[in-house]
Image (spheres, helix red, strand yellow):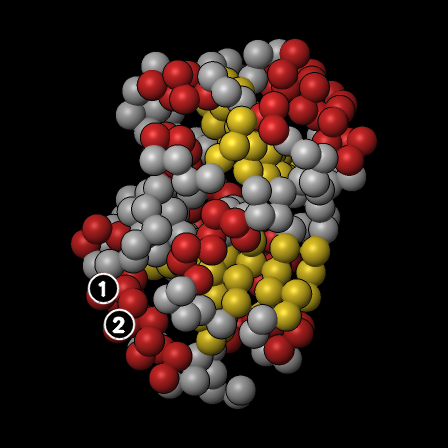
Amino acid sequence: MADKKLIFLDIDGTLTPAGSNVPPESALQAIRKAQAKGHKVFLCTGRNRGMLAPVLKYGFDGFIGSAGGFIMVDGKVIYDQPMDHEQFKLALDALHESGVFCTIEGRDQTFGDEDLGEFLKSTDGGNSEIERWRKALAEDLGIRPMKEYDGCPIYKIVFMCLEKEQLDKARLLVEKDFSFVCQTVAAHGCLNGELINRAFDKGRGILRVCDYLGVDVKDTYGFGDSMNDLEMIDTVGYSVCMANGDPVIKSHSDYVCPSVQEDGLAIAFEKLGL
């Protein structure tokens, strides 16, 4: 694969409008043209397998899911690292005791605090992560009530709260082993982010795919928009941020393309010769 590239795409706010499962037709055409040239195109997302499944029908070569915790290449699982159950319970209990609203993500199922929908209605504006959850709840995209959690392995906790101090108790207990990845957009009226195992991230997921396929990381491209894309942007050979993206991600990227609503992926693929 000397002249073939690996292309990694975030979903929400990059491949699709935030909260949507339908990419612009221009993006799909660009992806198909890239694959016809022999390049491989992967999803690289914070979504778990269950929540990214509706996008798989568009014919990707694999995915890095759960922000790097679960990886499939050409139909084969190459990495699978859920949270230790005791640490998961420790973190979730501490967040709940501090009044933090949470969703928890298994491999294929997601469970959310029952009053999260009302909490989101009270906030203003949004970034791509807030909008994803707002729409997922509003459109019933498979987030089940927390009371139905069945003990399945959990890969990630998504949190939302009004004050950063509400995270202090959980930080004290688990920050040694888990990163608190917060979105930096302040306009949405609440703090939101993800609790992610330090054993993985999107960047290390890309390195695992490269190692599995025998591809040099310099032959990779990454497209993202939010703070959970930072490790991907810093790892790939060439990085692209969407115009609708976080200012921090833009500052780390080699190129800022138009937004997802303005055919940004297609324009970037053309510019980069993909």
Image-quadrant location for residue 19: top left
Q: Which mark is residue 25?
A: 1
Q: Is residue 186 above or below residue 81?
A: above
Question: In the rendered structure, which amino acid carries the disc numbered 2?
Answer: Gln
| Residue at the spot 54% in from the left edge and 52% down from the top edge | 49
| Side of 216 where 59 appears, left or right | left
Observer able to see residue 239: no
Question: In the rendered structure, which amino acid carries the disc numbered 1?
Answer: Glu
| Side of 262 where 144 appears, left or right | right
Q: Check if mark 1's residue and mark 2's residue have beta carbons within 8 Å.
A: yes
Q: Residue furthest bottom?
A: 2
| Mark 2 element type | helix
Residue 197 percent location from the top left of the image: 69, 42
Viewer-nearest residue: 119 or 163: 119
| Residue at the spot 23% in from the left edge and 54% down from the top edge | 258
Number of numbered discs on residues? 2
Q: Is residue 71 above or below residue 272?
A: above
Q: Residue 29 carries which label?
A: 2
Observer able to see residue 69: yes
Q: Which residue lies furthest to the left in this view?
A: 262
Q: In this view, does 234 lie above or below 37?
A: above
Image-quadrant location for residue 97: top right
Position of the C terminus, as image quadrant, is bottom left
Q: In this view, does 269 lie above or below 145?
A: below
| Residue at the spot 58% in from the left edge and 71% down from the top edge | 75
Residue 156 percent location from the top left of the image: 62, 39
